[in-house]
Amino acid sequence: MLSTLLAETHEELAPLVAPPWVFAAIAAAIFLVLAFVTYSYRDVTNRHGDKTINQDPNDHGHVSHGPSGAAHRLTPVSEGAARRPRIGVMGGTFDPVHNGHLVAASEVQQTFDLDEVVFVPTGEPWMKADVTEAEHRYLMTVVATASNPRFTVSRVDIDRDGPTYTIDTLRDLRAQRPDAELFFITGADAVAQIVQWKDVGELWELAHFVAVSRPGHALDVRGLPEAGVSSLEVPALAISSTECRERVGRGYPVWYLVPDGVVQYISKHHLYRSSTT
Ligand code: ATP
Ligand code: MG
């Protein structure tokens, strides 16, 4: 009885069932759509499935991070394409320069495909008192960066009279290199203070800002123009110049916190010996 019923049902439905070639055509159409979607998606994801920084090397959107916290390198610029030189600007007191500065600069150089990172020791920092003589800080920075072919040091701030403001640093570097795109590198602690900087509204026109992580400081770029600032997680080195000065003052070593040449420079010039700050 059941088989009779099934046979009758099959006969009734037979005209409604599509022939096999219709199924094949539908399957082929689905395959083509999936292939197109997969190919398009490949442009905005890397092999870890994380979004890349951006595809247009002139679009400095926010860097995003994978689960490891590592940021992804910019898509290389194609051969022959018009490309402005990209220069990172690492401003700081560098009293003394330490490995935290160097790692941050190196990471931004790699991630943003920079041709050069110029370290700019401040002249008279407007926020700090009692800094070491500018010439010592400049020379320690030269020693620390000498082995990296992409690292250079600029005297623009130490040769300018009066307190150092980042806006003046950027104006001077822009005048020296009008062809270049500037990327100002700043640690998480300094990012929090940008809004207090002189002529803050003009900063974004002169450079793209790269805010790097720093142990002990939350990296927070809220309140800053989204298009003008990227955030980047860099290897965490809990080192500060203040701590280096204090260690030398207490007779503790700074080996491996600062480059070897800087340890020797500090020793040779008896820097920080009476430091209590
Ligand atoms: P000080 O303790 O004297 O203030 P510092 O270690 O903070 O010295 P600065 O010369 O003030 O060094 O810093 C220059 C820039 O480098 C700042 O933007 C700062 O946020 C960043 N920076 C300093 N140390 C680190 C670090 N360990 N990791 C990431 N960024 C850092
Ligand atoms: Mg500092």
Image (tube, helix red, strand yellow):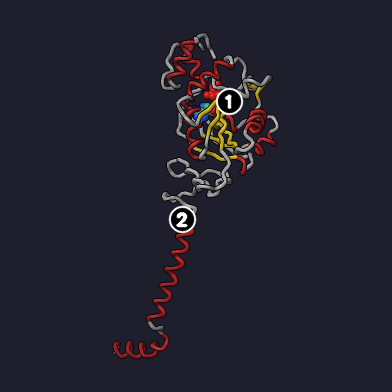
Q: Residue furthest front?
A: 80
Instruction: Kindly check if marks 2 and 1 are in contact, taking CB atoms under 8 A apart as contact.
Output: no
Question: What residue is rendered at 60% in x and 32% in y?
Answer: 192
Question: What residue is rendered at 44% in x and 50% in y?
Answer: 46
**Which residue does the numbered mark 1 point to in the structure image?**
154
- Determine whether the beta carbon of the residue marked 1 sits less than 8 angstroms from the nearest atom of ligand 1: no
Question: What residue is rendered at 47% in x and 62% in y?
Answer: 37
Quarter that holds the C terminus: top right
Q: Secondary structure at mark 1?
A: loop
Location of residue 210 with respect to 245 vertically, above or below:
below
| Viewer-side label of 2, 1 | 1
Q: Is residue 14 left or right of residue 113?
A: left
Residue 174, quarter of the rendered image: top right
Image location of residue 190, percent across then percent down = 58, 30
The reply to whether residue 104 is visible in this rendering is: no
Q: Is residue 197 left or right of residue 54?
A: right
Mark 2 belongs to which amino acid? Arg
The one of 238 and 218 positioned closer to us in this rendering: 238
Mark 1 belongs to which amino acid? Ser
User: Local crowd at mark 2 within 10 Å, few (<14), some, or many (≥20)?
Assistant: few
**Which residue does the numbered mark 2 point to in the structure image?**
42
Q: Secondary structure at mark 2?
A: helix
User: Local crowd at mark 1 within 10 Å, few (<14), some, or many (≥20)?
Assistant: many
Image location of residue 189, percent across then percent down = 56, 30
Image location of residue 218, percent across then percent down = 54, 34
Question: What residue is rendered at 68% in x and 19% in y?
Answer: 161
Dot 2 or dot 1, earlier in sequence: 2
Quarter that holds the N terminus: bottom left
Cα separation between marks 2 and 1: 41 Å
